[in-house]
Image: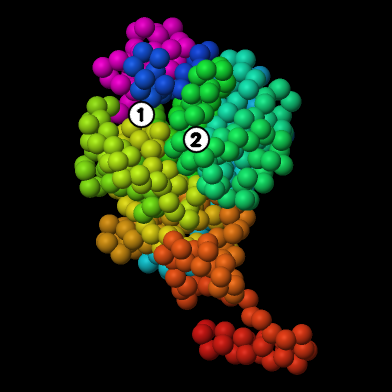
Amino acid sequence: MAGYSIPTTERSTEAAYQQCLNPSCSATFGIDEAHFSCPKCGDLVDVVYDWDRLPVPRALSDFEAKWSRRLDPLCFSGVWRFRELLPFAPADRIVTIGEGQTLLQRADKVGAFVGMSTGNLMLQYEGMNPSGSFKDNGMTAAFTHARMVGARRVACASTGNTSAALAVYCSATDHGFKAIIFIGSGKIAYGKLAQALDHGALTVQIVGDFDDAMTRVREVSDRLGIYLMNSVNPFRLEGQKTIMYRVLEANGWEVPDWIVVPGGNLGNSSAFGKAFIELKHLGLIDRVPRLAVINAAGARTLNELYSAREVRWRSGLADSAKIGAFYNELDASGVKASTIASAIEINRPVNLKKCLRALEFCDGVVRQVSDQQIMDAKARVGAGGLGCEPASAASVAGAKLLREEGVIAPSDRVVCILTGHQLKDPTATVAYHGADQENFEKVLGSRGVRRAGFANRPVIVPNDLDDIIRTIALYSEAESAGA
């Protein structure tokens, strides 16, 4: 099967192991080792399973029985109740804080904005996780592996959500983990930074952006033997696969036509692709959805490489010369990632190669959307009842763009992934809707965003009862006229 790592004879006695993604290397390593890149060639590493040696459910619906055992923490977890599909850890080593209690919601108001037929747009809301974002799905798996290998200090570079999740898992568990977080200067939303600080993490702010912080945290982790928690860690992606299992579960195990996801470090898109590769390989689904990965225009690396320069998976031999040339252009011009969607403000996505594999397997497409499109889509998501951080809304903005292009049909069944909670970045929300023009210009106007009809501005009235009643009456009349 294209893109699927077949177990090698070298590891024939192990049901789960790690393997280099580079087909000219394909080195294998035990699960009891911590590798965040191949120590032989430096490429990415996969977690691979010899499914013939493992108990596999006869059907995805078999997982429904675990709902009756929700007093068991592993059945309660929206990650570990699917542990037969990420079987790398013994049950007594699993680290869980009840992650994965998420929601797939039909969203007809948002669907109308996108251009979908009634009932055909769904929002997978990951903001209900303990730290408020999808990152907890990956953290529970990575912390489990860290515990398996005896790690105590854990570190990450972050635009916000990763650091929040890392700090939560360190503070909410009693396994002795100590958190170290690297952030760039001015590149983290306050709602997320507040979590890292409040949960007691050592937070190191360097002069630079996320890509600079990522370089340093990898160097520091290598030098000091610290366990790295960014999504270059293959066990993070094992946990993030379960987002797709929950989408299928909430959809009656029916596969949708499209999964639309924001693209930053490309961990989610890579994990989703791996989930569907494995499910198809196991015969648990008979078709796969198409995958759409949406960049912010100010951090458009994937769209540039995939759509403009036609870089492809090529069985693990993606054109490194084209990738390197683009990165050299960024360096030569001094271009840094810049978008209001801080969670995807990344120029050098560490999971680029795995994402290319996912795009090939899922017949994927890549697009970019502007900050204006992101903020307008975010306002419509909020008006539809859920609310999300700006990066999440890139999925909805991207679905709208693909609908306008005719790539997505109005009758297609589409799931947009909302990656983080609305209060992760309240600064952007208040600036978009608020009446303070100076604040708007500072936060959004400087990024080319202009006020649109979706803004829900507060109405300023004198402290007078009659004026207040008159204002409410006028608002009610306007609402009735609009209806």
Q: CA distance from mark 1 to mark 2?
A: 37 Å
In this picture, residue 366 sits left or right of residue 423: left
Q: Secondary structure at mark 1?
A: helix
Q: Is residue 194 magenta?
A: no
Choose top left, top right, bottom left or bottom right for residue 89: top right
At label 2, which amino acid type do we have? Ala
Comparing labels 1 and 2, the label whose residue is closer to the camera: 2
According to the picture, the residue beneath numbered tag 2 turns out to be: 213
At label 1, which amino acid type do we have? His
x%, y% of residue 217?
52, 28
**Which numbered disc covers residue 281?**
1
Q: Residue at x 55, y 73 (%)?
A: 437
The residue nearer to you, when weighing 239 against 392, is 392
Residue 232 seen in the current view: yes
Placement of 435 over or under 338, stated as above or below: below
Q: Main secondary structure of the magenta part?
A: loop
**Residue bounds of the magenta highlight:** 1-30
